[in-house]
Image (cartoon, coloured by chain):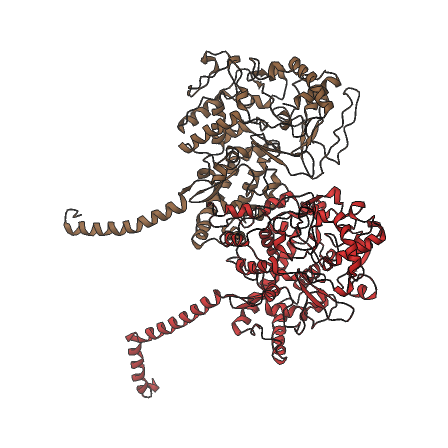
Chain colours: A brown, B red
């Protein structure tokens, strides 16, 4: 090589200039079509509630599906949805007039992408009568969203031979006019890549098929972390958990509780902290996490959010909002008779429930009630391990995120939680195994063995959602249980998902508090609990 | 060997030929010829493929009758809905046995499509068909007027008066779908049978006198014939059978003249697997509505159940029925129709000679007492002043109250509302901008400043649907042109206004629709008697979706004394 000669230099320079002339527009084009970030519109980012329902948490880059694929997929693969009705058939809370259900966030990163946010599982809905438009409540625990159904839908569609550029573009051609360049991008990049990613994602979720279905309003939070984030060896644990409401988080902070907020260690050995366990304020239903921020960050990572300044700001903003957003009040004003029962009910609450469920006191709230004591289904508490907690902490550290670590309480059990908005949190217990508050106040043998969940009409008498199908017989009274106060309301036979308490992880035993109260006392207690 | 001598002279020729070849000129010649062929082919293809011209009309009324909404054309992988003109005219000739009267030579008139006086039903298009030349082929498909134009006759044998904007009272859309399905299923639906018939028809047309100066598609050329022979007929058959197969959960025979199941076909086309749908939502037959005075209707609950308050969205949504998808819609042409319907399209008056003015005047206070709150005043804008209570006009009356047949209401599901709000996704192009915010927010407001509305619409139309909602009742509508909107109620279950003022057990249980002779005394079409029975369709109110109950009781005027009813009926004639 005669690098030194001026002749070669000139030639190299020319080549360089030509390459530059090609590279700059190509680079600009590539940036514009694949990386250019456009902020979401003001109607989303302008209000914390809208931002919670539709705002990005920064997962579009990794997990975002191309917009037009999301739009047309249900039109092509309707048979992989639970019923006729597109995404709405999955029970996702969906405000009228909105493009997508709550929890779908749309953002332009080069091309329009759709990913999921917290509201996918933490927005709920209710109706006070069947002929009514549902009210959507952000930060409530969804009891209707069939998340496993949603994941199955994407995976089954991607594995179907019709998931190809021909079929999908033909459907897109009914819905819009893509430019030639965008068509080519969809044809050669977005459709094949989306297919590959969805098939991979489906394979990662294959373990879920070997267990009972989650059903509406539940997921498998610990196993998702273990098997999908940490790629741990698949075990046979079942941790089906109801989506919790996450409003009014400040109320969880009982007096004189603490967690060293600046403890960003990789391991969380509760014993080493030097704080007695009953001085901690534990989160997650089995007390596996120790601060609000940690739960938020870990959950967002489950949605494949990426660590960035945007992400950290969003987490801080969402936390600030969730700390103060109040739980909604029961939508129907109490009758005079009901209202007159409330003081008596409050007294009963103070006697029987306050030790664990009263806020603003230094009681057992936020601490673990051991399994032997609470007696509820043990599967969820047993599904988590120190190994998994340490693994999660390690992953989060590698992502460069700082948050207090996850842990594993030594004595498995469930934490006592505050009861704000209790009326909207049915079905009850960590696995959603008891349909109404009235049923909670019965001994386990008298609670419904099977019922239907996912129907959003409130049962104001028993406090919970209507859980009986109209074509099912009313429960028959037998000697051992009090005459079952029949649930008068019922749902059409096409609605609801059958919940069987005999399945593993679905047990409805335990939490036998207030079950021996008299009928009158129970009525008073329920009247009070309805006001929370 | 022996011909060596004789082969001498050619050798020179052979040499020159060889030199010609070796010089390369032959390749140049072949190259030039190939280039010329390529240029001509490309030019032909370019002209042909870019061909997209609707037949246009100067007069707004003609545009309403035949103006294209874009549904004939396709986009990329979608071939579009348009039926080639020659196929359209050939089908009734080829398969007359599938027509109600089984007679060829009358086009689609036996299905209730309206051919204007002087038109030849064999070759001219009925009202409600539009034409567009797409990729060199003239294609036809439905336009708005197919369902929104009716025909009225004073007495049997009288010439029909064709009324634009009136709900079609004769078109049996279900029967038309059946005709197309049966034809497409017939083994003779193939090029070998269809192409000779088309050639014959083209010959016949040339021999008959031209019926007007309008656009007439040319004969098929050689290339067109080849396309149809080997491709077009098969594709059309596939498309018809696929589309109608998707709708096989519907009973087309249950619609009858003047009715359509509005919201079940879109479910299927949006991918809903209707075989798993509860039976309660599978029947949603509804009477066609009138489309006059749209300006006054802006912001009211539109559609029978009031599931949308935006006239613009409702128009685009109805446009799907004319084949116009977001990719193919001809927004300019559709808006021209919408603008004519805005204020210009008006119902004709009830023949004044047949109204008793004194009696009508006596009916006015009765109307004000019983009807006006929900149905508004006599003429646009229908909303009354301070002394006239029209507070419920354009709102939805709960089903428990109005108590009419629930099928149509139940056929519209919350899931469909959600899915429809993803239609026209991606529009307007400038979705993130604030420019269209004002438009979206004002779209359901009562009409005010038309100029401002049109200016907004110019940039923001079409935009993604965002106003479809599930309701739990039926909407209270203005009563303009009421006399032409028979039969009454959303499912057309009450033949006359006189019957509507009776309690449901006194309303006719069986009657015949689709006969266009008018009954001026009872206000409605003639639905009984030998002629009506021969020409009409047997409407049985006992069949699901056809219930004639509801809109009755003291509040609805069915308990009024007979004199008051007569006066009210007389007043209602003046609407």
Is residue B256 at all visible to an observer of this figure?
no
Q: How many marks?
A: 0
The percent position of residue B254, horizontal first and vertical second, equals 74, 55
The percent position of residue A318, horizontal first and vertical second, equals 49, 29
Is residue B37 at all visible to an observer of this figure?
yes
Q: Quadrant of residue B88?
A: bottom right
Residue drawn at x 44%, y 51% as measured from the top left: A182
Residue furthest left as drawn: A5
For the C terminus of chain A, the quadrant is: top right
Q: Quadrant of residue A505?
A: top right
Q: Nearer the viewer, residue B124 or B83?
A: B124
* Residue B288 left/right relative to A198: right
Residue drawn at x 58%, y 16% as measured from the top left: A369
Q: Nearer the viewer, residue A42 or A431?
A: A42
Residue drawn at x 16%, y 48% as measured from the top left: A2
On screen, residue B12 above or below B490: below
* Residue A246 left/right relative to A308: right
The percent position of residue A278, horizontal first and vertical second, equals 53, 13
The percent position of residue A351, horizontal first and vertical second, equals 66, 12
On screen, residue B325 above or below A322: below
Q: Nearer the viewer, residue B347 or B41?
A: B347
């Amino acid at each position: 090589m005669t690098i030194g000669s001026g002749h070669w230099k000139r030639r190299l320079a020319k080549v360089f200039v030509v390459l530059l002339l090609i590279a700059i527009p190509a680079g600009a084009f590539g940036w514009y079509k694949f990386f250019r970030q456009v902020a979401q519109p003001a109607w989303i980012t302008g209000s914390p509630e809208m931002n919670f329902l539709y705002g990005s948490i920064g997962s579009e880059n990794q997990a975002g599906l191309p917009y037009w694929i999301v739009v047309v997929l249900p039109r092509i693969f309707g048979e992989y949805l639970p019923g006729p009705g597109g995404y709405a058939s999955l029970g996702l809370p969906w405000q009228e007039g909105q493009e997508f259900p709550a929890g779908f966030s749309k953002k332009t990163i080069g091309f329009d992408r759709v990913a999921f946010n917290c509201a996918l599982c933490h927005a709920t809905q209710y109706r006070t009568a069947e002929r009514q438009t549902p009210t959507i409540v952000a930060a409530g625990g969804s009891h209707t969203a069939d998340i496993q159904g949603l994941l199955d839908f994407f995976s089954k569609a991607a594995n179907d031979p019709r998931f190809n550029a021909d079929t999908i573009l033909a459907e897109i051609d009914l819905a819009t006019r893509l430019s030639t360049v965008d068509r080519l991008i969809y044809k050669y990049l977005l459709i094949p890549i989306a297919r590959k990613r969805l098939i991979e994602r489906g394979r990662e979720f294959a373990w879920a098929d070997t267990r009972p279905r989650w059903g509406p309003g539940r997921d498998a939070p610990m196993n998702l972390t273990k098997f999908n984030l940490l790629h741990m060896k698949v075990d046979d644990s079942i941790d089906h958990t109801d989506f919790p409401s996450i409003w009014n988080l400040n109320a969880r902070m009982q007096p004189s509780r603490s967690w060293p907020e600046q403890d960003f260690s990789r391991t969380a050995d509760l014993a080493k902290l030097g704080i007695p366990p009953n001085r901690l304020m534990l989160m997650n239903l089995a007390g596996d996490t120790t601060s609000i921020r940690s739960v938020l960050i870990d959950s967002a990572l489950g949605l494949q959010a990426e660590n960035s300044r945007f992400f950290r700001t969003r987490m801080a903003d969402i936390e600030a909002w969730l700390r103060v957003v109040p739980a909604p009040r029961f939508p129907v004003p109490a009758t005079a008779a009901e209202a007159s029962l409330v003081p008596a009910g409050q007294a009963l609450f103070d006697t029987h429930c306050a030790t664990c469920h009263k806020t603003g006191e230094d009681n057992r709230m936020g601490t673990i009630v051991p399994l032997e004591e609470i007696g509820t289904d043990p599967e969820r508490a047993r599904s988590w391990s120190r190994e998994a907690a340490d693994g999660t902490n390690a992953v989060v550290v590698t992502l460069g995120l700082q948050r207090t670590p996850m842990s594993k309480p030594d004595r498995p059990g469930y934490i006592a939680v505050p009861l704000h908005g209790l009326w909207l949190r049915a079905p009850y217990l960590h696995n959603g195994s008891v349909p109404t508050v009235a049923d909670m106040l019965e001994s386990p043998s008298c609670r419904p063995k099977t019922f239907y969940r996912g129907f959003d009409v409130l049962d104001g008498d028993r406090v919970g959602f209507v859980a009986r199908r109209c074509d099912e017989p009313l429960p028959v009274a037998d000697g051992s249980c009090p005459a079952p106060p029949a649930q008068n309301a019922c749902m059409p036979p096409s609605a609801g998902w059958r919940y069987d308490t005999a399945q593993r992880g679905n047990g409805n035993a335990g939490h036998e508090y207030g079950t021996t109260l008299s009928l009158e006392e129970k009525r008073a207690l329920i009247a009070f609990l309805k006001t929370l | 060997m022996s011909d060596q001598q004789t082969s001498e002279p050619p050798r020179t020729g052979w040499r020159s030929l060889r030199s010609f070849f070796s010089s390369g000129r032959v390749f140049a010649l072949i190259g030039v010829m190939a280039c010329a062929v390529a240029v001509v082919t490309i030019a032909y293809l370019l002209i042909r493929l870019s061909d997209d011209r609707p037949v246009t009309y100067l007069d707004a009324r003609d545009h309403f009758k035949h103006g294209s909404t874009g549904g004939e054309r396709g986009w990329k992988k979608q071939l579009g809905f348009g039926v080639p003109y020659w196929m359209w005219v050939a089908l009734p000739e080829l398969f007359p046995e599938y027509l109600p009267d089984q007679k060829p030579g009358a086009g689609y008139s036996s299905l209730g499509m309206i051919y204007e006086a002087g038109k030849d039903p064999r070759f001219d298009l009925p009202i409600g068909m539009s034409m567009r030349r797409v990729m060199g082929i003239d294609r036809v498909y439905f336009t708005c007027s197919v369902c929104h134009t009716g025909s009225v006759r004073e007495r049997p044998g009288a010439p029909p008066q064709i009324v634009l904007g009136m709900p079609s009272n004769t078109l049996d859309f279900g029967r038309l779908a059946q005709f197309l399905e049966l034809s497409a299923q017939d083994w003779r639906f193939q090029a070998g049978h269809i192409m000779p018939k088309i050639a014959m028809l083209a010959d016949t047309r040339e021999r008959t006198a031209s019926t007007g100066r309008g656009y007439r598609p040319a004969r098929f050329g050689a290339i067109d014939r080849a396309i149809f022979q080997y491709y077009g007929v098969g594709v059309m058959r596939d498309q018809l059978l696929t589309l109608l197969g998707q709708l096989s959960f519907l009973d087309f025979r249950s619609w009858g003249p003047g009715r359509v199941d509005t919201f079940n076909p879109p479910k299927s086309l949006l991918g809903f697997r209707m075989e798993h749908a509860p039976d309660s939502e599978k029947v949603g037959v509804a009477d066609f509505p009138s489309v006059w005075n749209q300006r006054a209707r802006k912001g009211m609950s539109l559609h029978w159940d009031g599931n949308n308050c935006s006239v613009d969205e409702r128009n685009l949504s109805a446009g799907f029925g004319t084949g116009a998808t977001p990719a193919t819609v001809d927004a300019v042409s559709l808006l021209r129709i919408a603008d004519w319907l805005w204020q210009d399209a008006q119902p004709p008056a009830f023949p004044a000679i047949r109204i008793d003015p004194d009696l009508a005047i006596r009916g006015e206070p009765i109307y004000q007492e019983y009807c006006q709150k929900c149905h508004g005043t006599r003429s646009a804008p229908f909303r009354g002043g301070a002394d006239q209570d029209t507070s419920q006009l354009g709102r939805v009356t709960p089903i428990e109250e109005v108590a009419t047949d629930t099928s149509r209401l139940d056929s519209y599901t919350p899931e469909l509302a959600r899915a429809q709000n993803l239609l026209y996704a991606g529009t307007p192009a400038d979705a993130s901008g604030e420019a269209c915010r004002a438009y979206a927010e004002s779209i359901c407001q009562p009409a005010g400043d038309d100029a401002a509305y049109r200016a907004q619409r110019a940039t923001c139309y079409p935009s993604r649907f965002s106003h479809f909602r599930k309701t739990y009742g039926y909407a209270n509508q203005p009563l303009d042109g009421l006399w032409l909107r028979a039969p009454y109620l959303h499912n057309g279950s009450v033949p006359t206004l006189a019957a509507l003022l009776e309690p449901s057990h006194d309303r006719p249980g069986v009657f015949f629709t689709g006969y266009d002779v008018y009954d001026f005394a009872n206000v409605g079409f003639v639905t009984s008697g030998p002629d009506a029975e021969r020409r009409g369709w047997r409407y049985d109110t006992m069949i699901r979706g056809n219930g004639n109950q509801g809109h009755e009781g003291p509040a609805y005027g069915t308990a009024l004394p007979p004199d008051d009813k007569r006066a009210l009926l007389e007043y209602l004639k003046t609407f």
